[in-house]
Image (tube, rainbow, N blue to C red):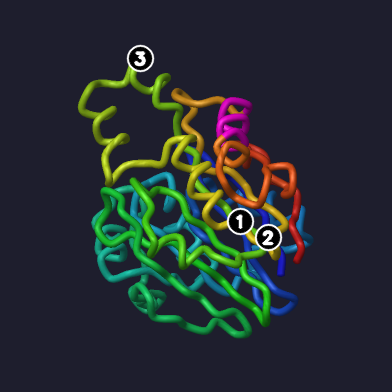
């Protein structure tokens, strides 16, 4: 299996995951051109993509979904609530309903040789999900845009080989920053986003002997810094009672505008 972040941040999100035979995108929150440029790094073309898995209907996750559906006819997999939100979005234009494939939390589906396991997350969207994707005995997961985590989230992320976990904001930067009060409260709520500290504690709960890589994703441009997110997550892991240390794993920040290295497991 392979994983690469094409873009990750409050301004746009898109992740590639694939096997030797099947290639999917999780979210399409940047332009079609940027997606193609990212796929070029993996020696792929948009025509190689078997499906787009959508986590939720916010614009930073669906920006080019309409263009990809009309120009490339790629099947879209998402929850019914998210599909309704997409159709009501003014940013996507018309999307052929024939491309829609419904997923339900906790019900696995197959896309060729990939097992797709959607699971619910708490966010201010219609019916948001994260995705765990498996091929053979390998597994990867993308979990961003979640206001909190619990045992259900931890169990869905355990034993993955590679992960993208949200580290959206530094709480102090957010509180003293320029965002209006209502937006700060939304971000800090159970339907908002994970802070750096919460991200570190979640990662600490899911690290395992099979894990080779963790990307910190969906960083806020206004309320976070790459180094701050990394150091905070690292500190949370190293200060815990876990048998693992941050240095035991490849932990890095997924960049906002540049595709990541390709992770192979």
Q: Which of marks 2 and 3 is nearer the N terminus?
A: 3
Q: Disc number at residue 221?
A: none
Q: Residues within 10 Å of mark 1 (few under 14, many from 20)?
A: many
| Residue occupying the point 35% across, 58% down | 121
Q: Which of marks 1 and 3 is nearer the N terminus?
A: 3
Judge from the rendering whether residue 230 lies leftward or rightward of residue 176; answer left or right: right
> Does the stretch in magenta take in 232?
yes
Q: Quadrant of the C terminus?
A: bottom right
Q: Position of residue 19 (x, y in %)?
A: 70, 74
Label 1 vs label 3: CA separation? 32 Å
SS assignment at label 3:
helix
| Residue occupying the point 38% across, 52% down | 149
Judge from the rendering whether residue 109 lies leftward or rightward of residue 115; answer left or right: left
Badge 2 is on which residue? 211
As drawn, the residue found furthest toward the left would be 182
Identify the main secondary structure in magenta: helix
Q: Which of these two is toward me, 153 or 40? A: 153
SS assignment at label 2:
loop
Q: Disc number at residue 176?
A: 3
Q: Which of these two is toward me, 195 or 15? A: 195
SS assignment at label 1:
loop
Labels 1 and 2 touching (C-beta < 8 A): yes
Looking at the rendering, the stretch of residues picked out in magenta corresponds to 227-235
Q: Position of residue 118 (x, y in %)?
A: 43, 70
| Residue occupying the point 62% across, 70% down | 139
Label 1 vs label 2: CA separation? 6 Å
User: On screen, 92 above or below 178?
Assistant: below
Badge 1 is on which residue? 207
Q: Position of residue 4 (x, y in %)?
A: 67, 54
């Amino acid at each position: 299996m392979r994983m690469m972040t094409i873009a990750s941040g409050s301004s746009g999100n898109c992740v590639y995951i694939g096997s030797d035979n099947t290639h999917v995108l999780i979210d399409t929150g940047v332009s079609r051109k940027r997606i193609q440029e990212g796929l070029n790094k993996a020696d792929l073309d948009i025509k190689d993509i078997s499906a787009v898995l959508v986590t939720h209907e916010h614009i930073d996750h669906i920006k080019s979904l309409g263009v990809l559906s009309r120009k490339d006819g790629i099947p879209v997999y998402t929850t019914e609530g998210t599909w309704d939100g997409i159709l009501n979005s003014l940013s996507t234009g018309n999307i052929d309903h024939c491309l829609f494939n419904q997923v339900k939390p906790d019900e696995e589906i197959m896309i060729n040789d990939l097992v797709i396991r959607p699971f619910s997350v708490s966010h201010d969207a219609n019916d948001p999900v994260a995705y765990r994707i498996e091929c053979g005995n390998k597994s990867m997961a993308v979990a961003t845009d979640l206001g909190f985590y619990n045992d259900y989230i931890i169990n869905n992320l355990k034993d993955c080989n590679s992960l993208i976990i949200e580290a959206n904001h530094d709480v102090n930067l957010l509180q003293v920053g320029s965002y209006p009060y209502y937006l700060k409260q939304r971000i800090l709520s159970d339907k908002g986003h994970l802070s750096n500290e919460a991200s570190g504690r979640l990662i600490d709960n899911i690290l395992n002997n099979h894990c080779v890589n963790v990307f910190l994703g969906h960083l806020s441009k206004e309320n976070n810094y790459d180094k701050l997110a990394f150091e905070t997550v690292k500190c949370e892991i190293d200060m815990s009672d876990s048998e693992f240390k941050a240095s035991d794993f490849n932990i890095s920040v997924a960049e906002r505008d540049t595709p990541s290295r390709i992770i192979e497991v």
